[in-house]
Image: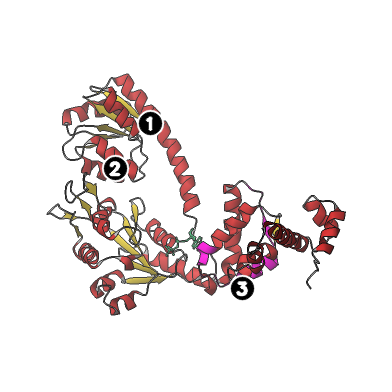
Amino acid sequence: MLVVDDDGANRKVVATILGGEGFEVAEAADAFLALDRLDRFHPHAVILDIKMPGMDGLGLLRDWRARGLEVPVIILTGHGDEFTASHCLAAGADAFLDKPPQRAELLLAVQNAVARGKLLEENRTLKEELRYPPLLGSSAAMEKLREDIARVAPARATVLIVGESGTGKELVARRIHELSPRAEKPFIRVNCAAIPEELIESELFGHEKGAFTGAVRRQIGKFVQADGGTIFLDEVGDMSARTQAKVLRVLQDGEVEPVGAGEVRRVDVRVIAATNKDLEKEVAAGRFREDLYFRLSVVVLRTPPLREHPEDIPELVSYFTAQACQEYNRHCKKWSPEALEQLARYPWPGNVRELKNLVERVVIMDLAETITAVDLPSVSGRGQDPELAAVFAAPTLAEFHARAEREYLKRMLERHHWNVAATARAIKTPRSNLYKKIEAYKLRREE
Ligand SMILES: Nc1ncnc2c1ncn2[C@@H]1O[C@H](COP(=O)(O)OP(=O)(O)OP(=O)(O)O)[C@@H](O)[C@H]1O
């Protein structure tokens, strides 16, 4: 349990009750320490006071929830009224108790919170597994990458991961963290390209309340959140010169300066950066600081584009198919050898991400049990499907119906190897009707 209260005597009361029941209790006297304890101890629940100097309990709770921290929170306050209670519950508190806490009431709230926390944790593990699959691929290129990851993980060295979009740079960063001595500490990802220029500095380094217009609350920066752990700067090539200078300072001196704070704080953070830009070119063009580039690129790992290791496609496809079938509740599907060959010939400009999306689309469409090359028009013509384009180019509705029907029948017949009886059965139309349509649309088997 984590007890957050600026009043030491109150903390002791709660800690004594909980300690007496065998709970392990950590304490924090303010919002900053609370975050630190949260990271360090991963408590099963937090007992939080509202009135505290600096950031109050409600602000802290909102901040945690906004960042996706789901730890159960029990609010304890001496100023309990309905208005505050409804605010706390709306902000994501699990329970709201008056001070001084009644032993039985407190224990019941804690037990409920712990039960909910366990469910959350199970849920999170499942979700994480869904979101962060293992780094797949047994090709020589992927084996080499895995070896490099294992080699650099234990050191504190900064790592720069370069590679095209969708090649698994984030997965690599997570693996490095997981295999490092920091694995139990936070892994914080910042997508430098997704944050507006004027916000990135306070996002990374935090800001004081009132530091600029709109800074209504104090914000703890990502570098501080990552203290003891790893920060992953994704799309690092997209940082402004000003932010680059500040990041350089953290790398050189381990110091961060929240916007408007006027003082620095020391952090111990391992930096992993990733980019799909050619950073050397960016340096040459004067858009990226050379000194920062040298600092970041102590170790460089390259994630290979999928077209360089097409032999991994069957393994990836089988993993993503099983995953999608489970997620969308579909029967498990197989891929025909021809379909897999077709995938191997495609150049995959969007790499593994594109492959994963294609597999998901095919699974959702819920075609036959075996997926054949016919089901993959988008990869056979580099994303173009002229037949379908022709259907949608129909000038009238009647013409659209006709073209769509023709195309549909043609594909269904091909899927059933032009066995008219089987096709008719599959699409639930009389065989005679199908023969008529084949005549009318002049459908012929292509050899
Ligand atoms: N080797 C791999 N094994 C399993 N999944 C992978 C692999 N490579 C990529 N993926 C999956 O492909 C998707 C894209 O991966 P990721 O986000 O790590 O790519 P990225 O290189 O960081 O892309 P971007 O540069 O666009 O951010 C994710 O869903 C990831 O799980």
The amino acid type of the residue labelled 2 equals Asp
Q: Nearer the viewer, residue 145 or 78?
A: 78
Q: Which mark is drawn over residue 63?
A: 2
Asked if residue 308 shows in the view, the reply is yes
Q: Amino acid at mark 3?
A: Arg
Q: How crowded is the residue under tag 1: few (<14 C-alpha within 10 Å), some, or many (20+)?
A: many
Residue 137, x across and y down, in percent: 54, 65
Q: Secondary structure at mark 1?
A: helix
The answer to whether 419 is drawn above or below residue 296 in the figure is above
Which residue carries the number 3 mark? Answer: 345
Observer-side mark, 2 or 1, equals: 2
Q: Disc 3 on helix, strand or loop? A: helix
**Which residue is the extreme one toward the front?**
396
Q: Which residues are magenta?
A: 330-354
How crowded pointer 3 is (Cα within 10 Å; few <14, some 14-19, many 20+) is rated as few
Residue placed most toward the observer, 110 or 182 = 110
Work out whether mark 1 precedes mark 3 in sequence or the reverse, and give the earlier one: 1
Query: Given this view, does label 1 or label 3 mark the residue nearer the observer?
Result: 3
